[in-house]
């Protein structure tokens, strides 16, 4: 989109005001980051967001024009050592940056020697990738044909089948008609799903449908059983009003909904605060931390199905979901659900997530929400289980902070620390008007299939009931995981230190320094959503890594999704002639189960500095 590597290139986020944001992950299986650089490595934020939703991510290897032709001749026209060396590097890049494979896009003609080696290159790349990257994928774009000519076919046929046969899939050009699809049925054989029929959302050229008519293309593609490749769905951002972006994005994907099977969440814990990885302010469990725009794709949490549902017939009774930046429980956004319960029915429900999770014997569920405006509608979570003959529901109970272990088979007088923290706010009114409801469910031999939220009119109510409900968080947690102790952040170190003098200001504090450094720490990543990195500055004694904390509240620097964080140009006071300067860094783990870890359990390191002696 727009050349690629925009605000998404900043690994630790940026202050972009109106960035492009993708959140319909449950509707797609593969995400390709495309640009016109020869080797396009997906920015880590996209990779993190996609993997969190179970979507695989591909980079792009593209050659174009005369320069691309010379490059192809250099590594393809010789012996196998040259093309194998290129393939090995592509595999290592994917392995190092932890994405899943490559789209190969050769947009220049090839000599007979080069095109003769292209299938060998593809086959070697695909084999090596499968060995080193679990679930790896190599796709070929419909451009060059077996003669070496650059000649788009708009279909899989005898002129390009050799490339399809050498990798995992084939991405067709966009100017096809239904007769192209009909001809491809014989060529694809049993690999019909490996043919991704290209759809240009910009609707350039002679296409069946694009823009808000993209569903016309999808209808034909699905009719013949092929996969689809939607090129440049950022059209809704690039070409339409930015202020209407979320509305247009939802409209675009809603029109495709019937042709896009939903893929499921397959593991626990399942936790989301619906954060889009952006916002106009930053909130931590109902407490506002910072005001101002921010954008951090790695911070995007699992997104639901966005849809509008109406009752058949007169259409009375409806429910609609959409994301909203106006308020948040944790992060920068929440999920807004509007609806209407007609007089003749007791409740309406909306399916938010598709699941495919074998359930442990006991799970805890949590819902954080608030109703906007006057409403006495009752809000509850609903689960559906698969058609498993052995599935047995032993019981469902509501938990609250006072009865956290009442229904346990073995009542715990002193619950484990993680469990006590998890249920600490259940059934209570929280800051900002939020409410948390917690449930305990005993199951045996079951598979969870759907997670829904239902809205019921109060008993005895007979009038039409409208509601606006804001969801802040949903959790489905294996009860056993809450019995395990939470590890502590260990071995926080400070390295790659760089000092600069700040430019003097006419008004403001005395001489200041700008500090750059890298923090590293030791911690297993699987139990946490992320780490929140803080600092506390001041002067005085102490020793690195120890000493009592200063009196002031730590300032949040940012979020980390690995065990390191780079600090750039942090303003600190210059050390005086008679004393040391001190800056303390604190690393707060954020557990997936969504509770605050006390500051005493954060990792920390202190950096002491003084003026150089002359």
Image (cartoon, rainbow, N blue to C red):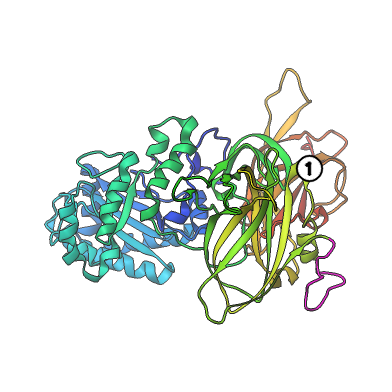
Specify whether residue 188 is in view.
yes
Residue behind mark 1: 536
Which residues make up the magenta segment? 402-415
| Horizontal relation, residue 282 to residue 542: left or right | left
Residue 307 can be seen, yes or no: no
- Asked if the stretch drawn in magenta spans residue 60, the answer is no
Q: Residue at x 22, y 43 (%)?
A: 207
**Residue 291 image-quadrant placement:** top right
Q: Residues within 10 Å of mark 1 (few under 14, many from 20)?
A: some
Q: Residue 306 or 549: which is nearer the viewer? A: 306
Predominant SS of the magenta segment: loop
| Frontmost residue, 527 versus 128 | 527
User: Residue at coordinates 33% horizontally, 49% vertically from top-left?
Assistant: 230
| In this picture, residue 505 sits left or right of residue 60 | right
The total of numbered circles placed on residues is 1
Q: Secondary structure at mark 1?
A: strand
The residue lying at 16 percent from left, 49 percent from top is 150
- In x, y percent, where is residue 114? 18, 58
- Residue at 80% across, 54% down: 545
Q: Position of residue 506 (x, y in %)?
A: 73, 17
Residue 411: in magenta span:
yes
In the image, taking residue 497 as reference, residue 77 lies left or right, namely left
Q: In the shown orientation, is residue 600 left or right of residue 19?
A: right
Question: In which quadrant of the rendered image does the C terminus lie?
Answer: top right
Which of the 4 image quadrants contains residue 145? bottom left
Q: Residue furthest top?
A: 506
> Residue 241, image x and y in percent?
44, 29
Q: Residue 151 in the image: state x and y as whole percent.
A: 15, 49
Q: On the rendered image, what quadrant is the N terminus found in?
A: top left
């Amino acid at each position: 989109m727009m050349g690629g590597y925009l605000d998404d290139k900043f690994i630790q986020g940026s202050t972009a005001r109106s960035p492009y944001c993708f959140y319909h992950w449950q509707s797609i299986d593969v995400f390709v980051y495309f640009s016109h650089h020869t080797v396009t490595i997906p920015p880590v934020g996209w990779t993190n967001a996609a993997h969190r939703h179970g979507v695989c991510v591909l980079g792009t290897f593209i050659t174009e024009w005369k320069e691309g032709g010379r490059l192809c001749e250099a590594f393809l026209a010789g012996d196998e050592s040259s093309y194998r060396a290129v393939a090995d590097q592509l595999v290592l890049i994917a392995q190092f940056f932890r994405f899943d494979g490559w789209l190969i896009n050769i947009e220049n003609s090839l000599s007979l020697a080069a095109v003769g080696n292209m299938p060998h290159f593809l086959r070697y790349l695909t084999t090596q990738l499968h060995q080193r990257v679990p679930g790896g994928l190599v796709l070929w774009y419909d451009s060059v044909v077996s003669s070496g000519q650059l000649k788009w076919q708009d279909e899989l046929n005898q002129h390009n089948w050799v490339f399809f046969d050498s990798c995992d899939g084939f991405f067709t050009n966009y100017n096809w008609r239904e007769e192209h699809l009909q001809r491809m049925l014989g060529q694809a054989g049993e690999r019909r799903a490996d043919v991704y029929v290209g759809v240009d959302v910009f609707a350039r050229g002679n296409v069946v449908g694009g823009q808000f008519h993209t569903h016309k293309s999808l209808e034909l593609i699905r009719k013949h059983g092929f996969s689809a490749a939607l090129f440049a769905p950022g059209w809704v951002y690039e070409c339409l009003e930015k202020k209407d972006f979320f509305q247009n994005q939802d409209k675009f994907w809603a029109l495709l909904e019937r042709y896009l099977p939903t893929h499921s969440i397959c593991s626990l814990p399942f936790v989301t605060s619906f954060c889009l990885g952006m916002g106009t302010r930053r909130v931590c469990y109902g407490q506002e931390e910072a005001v101002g725009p921010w954008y951090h794709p790695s911070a995007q949490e699992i997104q639901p199905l966005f849809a509008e549902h109406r009752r058949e017939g007169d259409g009375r009774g409806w429910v609609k979901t959409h994301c909203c930046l106006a308020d948040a429980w944790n992060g920068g956004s929440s999920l807004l659900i509007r609806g209407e319960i007609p007089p003749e029915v007791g409740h309406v429900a909306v399916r938010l997530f598709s699941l495919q999770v074998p359930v442990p014997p006991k799970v805890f569920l949590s819902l954080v929400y608030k109703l906007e405006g006057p409403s006495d509608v009752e809000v509850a979570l609903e689960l559906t289980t698969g058609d498993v003959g052995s599935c047995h529901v032993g019981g469902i109970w509501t938990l609250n902070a006072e009865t956290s272990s009442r229904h346990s088979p073995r009542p715990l007088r002193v619950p484990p620390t993680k469990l006590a923290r998890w249920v600490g706010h259940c059934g209570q009114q929280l800051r900002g008007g939020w409410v948390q409801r917690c449930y305990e469910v005993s199951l045996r031999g079951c598979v969870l299939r759907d997670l829904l939220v239902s809205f019921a009119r109060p008993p005895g109510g007979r009038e039409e009931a409208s509601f606006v409900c804001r969801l802040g968080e949903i959790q489905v947690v294996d009860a056993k995981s809450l019995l395990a102790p939470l590890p502590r952040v260990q071995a926080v170190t400070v390295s790659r230190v760089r000092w600069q003098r700040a430019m003097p200001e006419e008004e403001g504090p005395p001489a200041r320094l700008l500090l750059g450094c890298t923090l590293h720490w030791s911690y297993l990543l699987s139990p946490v959503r992320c780490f929140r990195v803080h600092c506390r500055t001041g002067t005085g004694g102490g020793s690195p890594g120890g000493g009592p904390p200063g009196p002031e509240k730590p300032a949040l620097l940012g979020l980390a999704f690995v065990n390191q964080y780079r600090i750039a140009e942090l303003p600190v006071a210059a050390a005086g002639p008679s004393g040391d300067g001190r800056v303390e860094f604190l690393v707060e783990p954020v557990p997936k189960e969504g509770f605050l870890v006390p500051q005493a359990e954060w990792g920390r390191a202190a950096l002491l500095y003084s003026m150089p002696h002359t």
